[in-house]
Structures are given as C-alpha cells and as structure tokens.
Image (tube, rainbow, N blue to C red):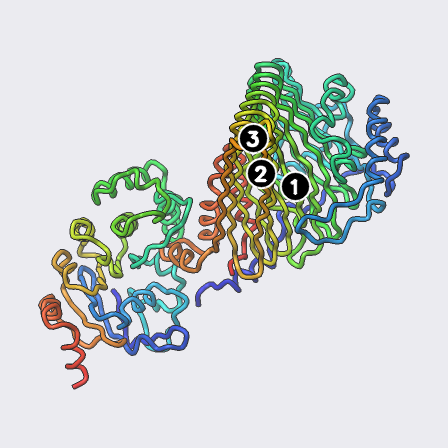
Amino acid sequence: MLKIKNLQANIEDKEILKGINLEINPGEVHAIMGPNGSGKSTLSSVIAGKEEYTMTGGEIMFEGEDLSELDPEERAHKGIFLSFQYPIEIPGVSVTNFMKASINAHRKAQGLEDMPAKDMLKMIRDKSELLEIDRKFLSRSLNQGFSGGEKKRNEIFQMAMLNPKLAILDETDSGLDIDALKVVANGVNKLRSEDNAVLLITHYQRLLDYIVPDFVHVMVDGKIVKSGTKELAYELEERGYDWVKQEKSV
Amino acid sequence: MAYTEDDLKKELETKEYEYGFYTDLKSETFPIGLNEDIVRAISKKKEEPEWMTNWRLEAFREWEKMIEPEWANVHYAKPDFQAISYYSAPQTVDPNKTLDDVDPDLLAMYKKLGISVDEQKKMNNVAMDVVVDSVSVATTFKKTLGEKGIIFMSISEAIKEHPELVKKYIGTVVPKKDNFYAALNSAVFSDGSFCYIPKGVKCPMELSTYFRINQAGTGQFERTLLIADEGSYVSYLEGCTAPSRDENQLHAAVVELIALDDAEIKYSTVQNWYPGNKEGKGGVYNFVTKRGICEKNAKISWTQVETGSAVTWKYPSCILKGDNSIGEFYSIAVTNNYQQADTGTKMIHLGKNTKSTIISKGISAGKSQNSYRGLVQINSRANNARNFSQCDSLLMGNLCGAHTFPYIEVKNKTAQVEHEATTSKIGEDQIFYCNQRGIDTEKAIALIVNGFSKEVLNKLPMEFAVEAQKLLEISLEGSVG
C-alpha cells in the first residue's frame, strides 16, 4: 500500500529525514517510536504533503502512485488520513459542517454527487455512537475550546467518517488521560480491517497496549534504526532510547 | 506540484467581476453638471409638487456651502461634481407599466443579475422594487401588499400619491444638511423606494429593492424612506450591483427608517457595487447615509454584507429615542485588492433602558484597507442604557490593513458599555488541516471566512444568506497570502 524508499526531506534547509525506508501493507498496524526531535512528526507531515517540507530525495509511493506529485487534498482523496498531533481550531465552523465539506469534497473527487442530507445524518449518528461521542459536541465550533481528549476523539471521529485506507495517528496519545486513551484506542480498533492500515506515531509504549502493532520501528535522527515486533516496544520502555542510539553508533 | 497561491492568483487574474456587464438600454440622460436649474429640471421631470422642488432647492443651497468630509480613513481622488450627470432614466420605461410592458432587455438584465422578477414573485415570496440608474422600473406584488394597507412603491410615485406621508417624514431622520453627501442626495435624488406599514400589520413577505448603476458617467442618488407604524413589523432587503467601468461612479444614497412605538424594522443589505479592477482602477464610490429612529419599545436591526465598491463610507445608525428601544448593527465588510472601507455605526441612546448591539466583522485581503468606525453615545437621560460591541478583523496576507476606531461617550452613570475586539489571520495551518480533509484551498478559505462571519450571516433572511455566502467566496478568491 505505502512504499517509502530512501526518503529525505528538509524544512528551511535543515535536513530532518535522512533516508527513510518503510513498507506498509493492507491490514497492518505499524508503530514508529523515537525520542523528541527524531523526525517522526515530519514523516507524517511529508506523507500528508505539508508544503513547508521539501522532499530532497527518495520516493513515496501509495498504491503504485507517486505521492510527491499530488496536492495534500489529492492525497486525502486517495485515502490518506492524518490525525493531527495538534488539531487546528476553525471558529464558527461546526464539526458537522466541517465533515459535510470534507465528505462532499472526497465524493466530488470520485465523481459523485454530494451526499444526501439524510444519509449524512445517519452516518454521523452511527459513527458518533460507535465512538461514544455526545452529539451536542458535533454542533460546536471545530476544536475551539475543546479539551485535549475532545480534540483527539474528534480526530478519530473524522477518521471514522472518512474511512481512509491509511490512517496516520500522530501522537494521538499525547495529552490523554487513561480513560480518554482507551476510548480513542477502542475507536481505532473498531475501524481496523483487512483493507486498511494504520501508522501510529508515538513516544510511549502505553498506547501500544491498546492498539497492538504488527511492526514497531525506532526512529533516531531522521532514520529508522531498528525494526521489530511489538516486543521491541517493551524493550524500549524498559531500556530507553539511549540503548538503540548506542547500538546505532557502534 | 502543489497548487500554490501563485497559481491561484494567476487563475484569478482572468476572473472578472461577475456583474460587470453593460446593458444597452436607451437612456435619457441629463447634461453633466449641477446647478439650481438642474435641480429644478429633475423635479419637473418627475412631475413633483412645488413643496418638493423647494425642499430640493433648499438642500442644494446648503450643499453649496458645505465641504466634502475628510476624516474617514480612505484616500481617493475627489469626484468632480460638475462632471456627473444627475439624471439618467432607461427611456422605454413608462411609469404606469405592468411587468409585461417592461423592456425585454431590462428583463434580460435582471436575469443576468440572477433576479428574474417572475421567479422572485413565485419562489421567494419577495416583493421587489428595482431601481436601474435613477428610475424605479418594476414594483411587484403591489396588489397583495395593498390588501394589507402596505404601501410599497417608488419614492417618486409616493411623492405624488401619498404626499402627506412623505412630507411628514422625509428629512426627519437624516436632515437635508446632515452631511455633504446627504445634502447632495436631498437636492438631486432621482428615485428610490418608499414603504409604509400600517399600525399593527406584520408585513407578510420580505420587501426587496435592487439597485443597479448601468449608464456611464452617472451618479446614483436613491432615497429610501421606510415607516413602520405602531406595532408593525417589516423585513426589508436591499441589493446593489454596477457594471465594470474604468472611471469611478458615484453612489450617494440616503436611507431613513422610522420605527414608531412597538414597531420593528429589519433592514438587510448586500452591497456588491463594482470594486474596481485588481490595480484599483475604476469602481464605485459608495457614500451613503443610513439612519433610523426608534420610538418607545421599537427595534431597528441593520444587517449589511459589504463586498463591493472602491471606497465605502457608510454608518447605518440608530437613534434610540424611545424608552426600551433596541438598536442592532450586524456587519460583514470585505475588502480585497485596493478597496477601502470605512464603515460602522452610531448608536445614540436617548431613552431609558435602551439597548444596542454591534457585531462587526471586517475581512481584509490584497492591499485593501478596512476600518471599523463606531460611536456609542449614552446621553444624560438614558438611564440603564446598555451596549455591547464586538469588532473582529480577519486578515489575509501581509499587505492589507484592519483598523478599529470605536468612540464611546457616556453621560449617564448607570450605563453599561462593553467593547470587545479581536484580530486574527487565516493561518497556513488551518488551510493545511482542511486540505488534509480533502478540502481544496479555495473552499477552505470560504469555509473559514463563513465561520468567521457566521454570527452576522445568521441574521440575514435565508435566501439572502446564501447569496451573501457566494459573494464572500467570489470577493476573496485568490487572496490567500
């Protein structure tokens, strides 16, 4: 599904990604772990197509198509979803209206008419029930005055509405207490299927207790230095990142 | 590669003012220039009674003594008032027309404007008075309204048919010598709308006026007089467009609203006069005086969406004379390219327990300048007066300006006055967030701007709100920076 080869990327001439290789197949859950400043969030932004980042080498292929040629919205239309580490506020635009605009933009890209209001309402009802979201929440302005937990839950709600092929969850666990974390993880698990894949980006192992990954990658200084199964996450939790860093420098 | 702002800008250079067509109607236009003879000629042309002619002449004499105001935060080459023609009428119009008699070219023009009169009649339940250049050409629904005793006609007709009402109220809210442009309008106003709602009547439909400047080298000086008698209610809509021209056209209107005891007037404007091209050439100078007076328990609510004009100078105001009266001002002013807007409101609290609310949303893009200027005045007898003002500015890019000039004068200790102001900028992060959800940059801006303007858009009647949203999108296309 996603094939990244020797990916290099800069921001303001500073090299952040220094040759990333990663392959994700349908049905798989991958976790990328690593210390602060290792380039994890940059990787998710580059996959999603954020303009501040410049790809300086390598390639990103999604279902056989070169992503670097596509605008962020076109990547979204192909089925790439990014759950933001810091979701953005849009005052005056309700969650529901934002989702309407989003879903209809996706449909338009597929040559479909706008979704009938009745279907939209039903889908909103179904997905909000699935994620235990109070429907009053949906008429509030997008992310404005939301608590950390509400913001993240809202991201997962949007993911449920859009049903992406590849969901990238950037630090979805940060700022969540354990109850909120469980709700979010539950939501993600309910949405997993054989056809879609998840890329988790996280500092800590605790999220991986709830969303169990098939593969764990450790990123240090713009490179994936170690890959393994979920056991690797436990090892990291125990021994810290210095251990991999040292191993790398040997 | 990604669709950048530059691409967007390029695309827009080819995009033109959508209403910039010119309809070739046969017009009867007066020679340029202004003197007492021209004022008399206008009055004669309109077969006005002598009192009206004299009223105009008094206004003209006052105007001659006045100088153009310079305090607003706008800069422009002053119009040469002797180089304008003060009267232009589409020639084929007969004042006693029915819709069937209207010039087919004129009807085609309405269709282009998206205001097919027939459709308006059937679908929107909107009664409509259309003013092209200077003459009111079609007032629909007159009969339906007549059954309720509502008078809705051009002001020229009203001067002839209801002189007692016109004489009693004209100039009582905006006096002839109120200001330079109001005096000019009083001398030369060519047409406009008149409306009277009798005691206790709730007007069953939205009343609407559509203004358009068609003829080159003319000014439009319409005058609207709206009287809501005791306990009545009316919602009034006003829309404006003009064709694209290189020279600046002048629009100096006066609107007077009178809300008698317990009456309510809701007055909504969508103003889309030609703003000039992207280098700032041409466009309409919009110098308008709008004011309403509230008697006891009355309420006047101004809602305006201002997207057009090269220069806007406009302060729809309320005089809260009666106890417990309420004034509201909801405004969205959008400026792009080289547009300049200096707009706001005056809330004059005279009566006890009077309340006013001001919500102003300014959106600036391109190299435009957008100013809010407002006055809240609480007079000594206005016990327990309350005002809440909120002025929000949204900036797009680094070359535009947003300014706020709130004046507050309080002469009564029991007053409560609140003022809030914010300035924000559309962020790249907001746009990227929308992009990531599949929404392209233009739609994203429209979404963000609509969200910003929501409190005001919600105040517009439904069909107008939709039109206003579209206008916001058109006005701001290509302005990401």
Q: Position of residue B363 (x, y in %)?
A: 54, 50
Quarter of the image for residue B365 reads: bottom right
Relative to A241, is B472 on the left or the right? right
Above-or-below relation of A71 to B342 = below
Quarter of the image for residue B191 reads: top right
Q: What residue type is labelled 3?
A: Gly
Q: Mark 3 lies on which chain?
A: B
Q: Of discs 1 and 3, which sits in the foreground? A: 3
Q: Which SS class for mark 3?
A: strand
Residue at the (21%, 42%) spot, across then down: A132
Q: Where is residue A236 in the image (x, y as percent from the top left)?
A: 13, 70
Label 1, label 3: how many angstroms apart (C-alpha)?
17 Å
Instruction: Residue under label 1, please give it.
Output: B314
Q: Mark 1 lies on which chain?
A: B
Above-or-below relation of B433 to B100 = below
Number of numbered labels in the structure image: 3
Residue B327: assigned label: 3
Quarter of the image for residue B102 reads: top right
Above-or-below relation of B311 to B267 = below
Asked whether residue B123 is in view, the answer is: no
Q: What residue type is labelled 2?
A: Gln
